[in-house]
Image (cartoon, grey):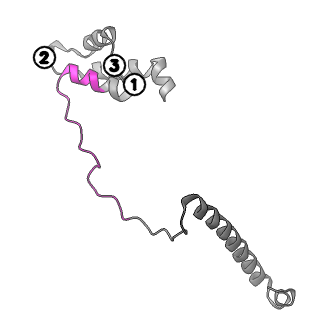
Amino acid sequence: MTPDESVAMTDEEQLIASRLSRRAFVGATAGATLAALVGHEPRLVHAQPPPAPEPPMPRDPVLTGVTPTIDRVFRYALGRPPSAAERRAAEEALRDPARGSRPSAQGLADLLWAVMMKPEFQLIY
């Protein structure tokens, strides 16, 4: 755009032309940099299709026993299996004589609270 052309344009047209030229400059320099990094010319990115309604991985089975519940809580929260002392304490918290081998809801809440209060969990998250 020459100085004579900018005089003939309204303020709004000058603003739009200025923005477009800056955007083209930034796009050209970013595109060249991206092309150099990636190794090919940049292409337009098209909208991705929506994700499938089902989960990407199969769901874990429903827990019905104390031992698998303890293993899953420690694996998901800390990324490791429980130690022998941790397993004993967790089993004591989860066992409910009235429910047999099924873990109690209050015991599970107590176990989750105890695991989240561990310094190891707080360092991870």
Q: Are marks 3 and 2 in contact (CB under 8 Å)?
A: no
Label 3 crowd bin: few (<14), some (14–19), many (20+), radius 10 Å: many
Q: Secondary structure at mark 2?
A: loop
| Residue at the spot of label 3 | 111
Residue drawn at the location 39% of the way across and 17% of the way down? 114
Q: Is residue 43 above or below residue 80?
A: below
Q: Name the residue type under label 3.
A: Leu
Q: Nearer the viewer, mark 2 or mark 1?
A: 1
Label 2 crowd bin: few (<14), some (14–19), many (20+), radius 10 Å: few
| Residue at the spot of label 1 | 78
Q: Position of residue 90 (x, y in %)?
A: 29, 14
Gap between marks 3 and 2, in whole Å?
18 Å
| Residue at the spot of label 2 | 100
Residue drawn at the location 78% of the way across and 81% of the way down? 14
- The stretch of residues the image draws in magenta is 49-72
Q: Position of residue 57 (x, y in %)?
A: 27, 45
